[in-house]
Amino acid sequence: MGSEEGEEARLRSVISENAKSIQRVRQNAERELIAAKEALERKAQELQRSEELLADFFENAAIGLHWVGPDGIILRANQTELNLLGYSSAEYVGRHIAEFHADQPVIEDILSRLSCGECLQGYEARLRCKDGSIKHVVISSNVLWENGKFIHTRCFTRDITDRKHAEQALREEIASRERAETALREADRRKDEFLATLAHELRNPLAPIRQAARISNAANATEAQKRWSHDVISRQVQHMALLLDDLLDVSRITRGTLELRLQSTELAAVIDAAVETARPLLDAKRHSFTLQMPPEPVHFAADPLRLAQVLSNLLTNAAKYTDPEGQIRLRAACAAGEITIAVSDTGIGIPPEELPKVFTMFAQVSSSRDHAEGGLGIGLALAKGIITLHGGEIEARSAGRDRGSEFIVRLPLRAMRSHSPAQTTDERSVNPVKRRILIADDNRDAALSLAALLRMDGHEVTVVHDGHEALQAFSQVQPEVALLDIGMPELDGYQVARHVRQDPLGQAVTLVAVTGWGQDSDKARAFAAGFNHHLTKPIEPEQLSTLLSAESLC
């Protein structure tokens, strides 16, 4: 008994100890479970906080963010991205990214490179906005991989549209400056060529003038030789005057001051005048000239002198730039309220690249310099200006080098709105009026030769060579007419005119400014100084004769 009781007591003690141990284990397990649960809760809270921070970063980032799945479908986009392109989330998310790229090869390249594990940095692309506009962006992107599986891309989109526009504007400005510099260099080159040509053209007539003058003065010259020399001098002086007139006309057109003298014009008369002007050159080069006219007379409103000037320019150009025995043709037609005049030739032609430049100032076809017989390169610019003032157009055509040219003029068929009574010329049989004339010019040859011409017409002429002598001659001669050179030394023509007008005796005299300056501003200045008339050198004798024979000089 005693032993059984002892064993029982021992067992109870063991059981009690085990129970206590189990209690301690349970308590420890409960504590660890609580700690683990608390740790797990903390981890969950941290994860939630991280997700919240990530979502906040994603949604509120200052640049556009979007995720794209391996199939190219947009999975997520932040508000910055949506605002950049103007879409709502429903309009953007769930659609293929290629729909928003303006350049299909670009998005294909992006997806291909990302699928191969490449990270993109600073990749430029163009995205299409909802309103149809295009945004220039820079994309930086990589792929989230899990166990080798493509989950989605992570794309950062930064707007660089303003920068691109600024770069484009800068490129355009640079290109514009380069074009301007090229144009300036071209203009400078053409200016140098023009000045060289002008010097050549103005020197050309001097040789025959000098030679003709020597022949005329030769003691053994026959009357026929003298007449021939006089004709040569007259022609060459006229040629120089026409060159200067062309320059002045182009300047007036450029400044918008050339005025047309519109009148009822007959087409055939204009063409006859142009052909007459060009005939010597056509004949000299033995060209075959064909003229085709409308069957009925054509009357229209135009400046006949200016139109004849244009057509004679086209005909002489055709003759110049066509080898001898070529074919020149002028065709005129009238239809549908429009007059068409075409001048064609079988000459050197115009290269295609030079066609757009033929009507610019000082332009000359590169292949023409060996064929040309002079010219300043302003004739076609002048022709275009005159035709434009008439409300018409002029066009140049050519199949190319050595394949001839054609210039086509189109003019509106307009009638004069009002008809002035026809002016008749009163051909008086009475003796021409004789005048008392004072000439003041520091160029002695110009003054004395003009005086000789006027004396041959019966006028009483006094010649002086500076402004002070002119004022002294006024009080002594009391001329009816004074021809005053503007550029005299000491006292110029303007100063002389003002002094004369201040004298009571100078009120009745007719003052004529004689000058090489023929712009409208020069005329206005002369009239302001007291001149009645303004004549541009070289003076046409007929023009001066008409002025002097008028009953009322002023």
Image (cartoon, rainbow, N blue to C red):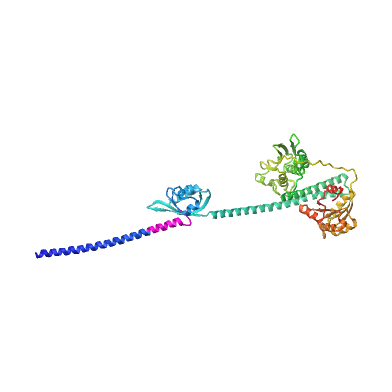
Residue positioned 13% across, 64% down in the render: 7
Residue 314, image x, y percentages: 73, 43
Q: Write the start and end of the magenta stretch as one range.
A: 47-67
- Residue 284 in sight: no
535 and 447: which is toward the camera:
535
Above or below, comparing residue 62 to residue 289 in the picture: below
Residue 163, image x, y percentages: 54, 55
Q: Is residue 515 magenta?
A: no
Residue 109 falls left or right of residue 375: left
- The dominant secondary structure in magenta is helix
- Quadrant where the N terminus sits is bottom left
Residue 219, image x, y percentages: 89, 49
- Residue 38 in sight: yes
Residue 27 falls left or right of residue 188: left
Residue positioned 29% across, 62% down in the render: 32
Residue 455 falls left or right of residue 317: right
48 and 512: which is toward the camera:
48
Above or below, comparing residue 247 to residue 5 in the picture: above
| Residue 496, quarter of picture | bottom right
Residue positioned 67% across, 53% down in the render: 184
Residue 137, image x, y percentages: 51, 53
